[in-house]
Amino acid sequence: MSHLVRFLVSAVCWVVAVTAALLLGVGVVRDRLPDPLATHWGFSGVPDGFQSRTGFLVVLLVGWLVIATIAVVCGVLGRRQRRTRAASAAVLGAAAVFVTGMAVAVVAANLDVADWTRARSLNWQPFAVLALAGAAGGIGWKLGNRGPDETPEAETSSPALALKATERTVWVSSVTSPVLLSIGGLTLLAALGSALLETPAAAMPLALAGVTCLALSSARVQIDERGVRTAFGPQRWPARRIHLDRITSARAEHRHALGAGGWGYRVLPASTAIMLRGGPCLVLRLTSGRDFVISVDHPERGAELVNALVTERSAL
């Protein structure tokens, strides 16, 4: 069993176990808790906020599952890096202890009281939970930081097209991000709702954010004898051009957005990426030794044309 599979199995079992502990722990003492129960305390330790028992449990579970899912996904997608798995394990450990510790503290403060206003004080308990969560994160890091990094597959350039001496070839492809389209559309709807409610202070920023998301939700890549040009949105701006004299080779690869640093325009120590979605990507190896990654549909033919143009240019 590889270290990646071990991480995935262990992480899933851990998430299920913590979720079950939260459900059973709160469920066992449910009848001994007031409804609503105190869920927030002031600096003096006196309760000043409340929530229903069901709402409290839902918030706990949703918060835990969202954090856990992100941690597991990042650990799996970053499978070539042992440190990624270690960081994910640290987050899983710290988050589990923090969520369960705060649940225990809140339940203990509300146990067997007639009304949430009579809940016991919370003073030192949150600090103890934070300390334990930090320790759990350290243990998770050590447990996840095992095994060698998986050896990356050998990088191979795509073959070059055979170009005729008088032939001028252009390759064009595009990509659209469903995530940015959805966010942009929903944000514009929120802006419209704010305008109808006569709250222009919120409508204007929302409208600007929505238009920006829609404008950057697609990209068009064009390859010709001048180089590789990537332009965003139907307005074809902003654009980034990489001249042929800066490119040594090109290849097509399957990349995950999280592995490239996330969605959008990302600059990492060894690469720069324009990632609108995970999947097929055109990868340009630059003369500086860096990679320039562009998520685009059907990049194989584009990589072949880039290699042909680079070869043709070097022969001049």
Image (tube, rainbow, N blue to C red):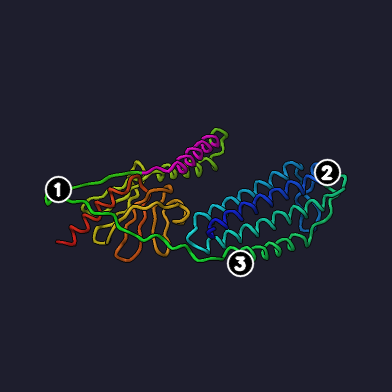
Disc 2 residue type? Pro
Q: Are marks 2 and 3 in contact (CB under 8 Å)?
A: no
Provide residue 241's location: percent of width, then percent of height. 29, 54
Seen at 28% across and 49% down, the residue is 302
Residue situated in front as seen by the camera: 282 or 151: 151
Provide residue 239's location: percent of width, then percent of height. 33, 50
**Numbered tag placed on residue 77 in the rendering:** none
Seen at 78% across and 55% down, the residue is 105
Disc 1 residue type? Glu
Asked whether residue 193 is drawn in magenta, I would say: yes
Q: Is residue 232 above or below residue 314?
A: above
The residue pinned by badge 2 equals 34
Residue situated in front as seen by the camera: 53 or 197: 53
Pointer 2 local density, CA inside 10 Å: few below 14, some 14–19, many at least 20: many
Seen at 28% across and 44% down, the residue is 172
Which sits earlier in the primary sequence, circle 2 or circle 1?
2
The residue pinned by badge 1 equals 167
Q: Is residue 181 above or below residue 71?
A: above
* Residue range (magenta): 175-194
The residue pinned by badge 3 equals 142
The secondary structure type at the circle numbered 3 is helix
Q: So how many labels did they put on this image?
A: 3
Q: Is residue 133 above or below residue 185?
A: below
Cα–Cα span, label 2 and label 3: 41 Å
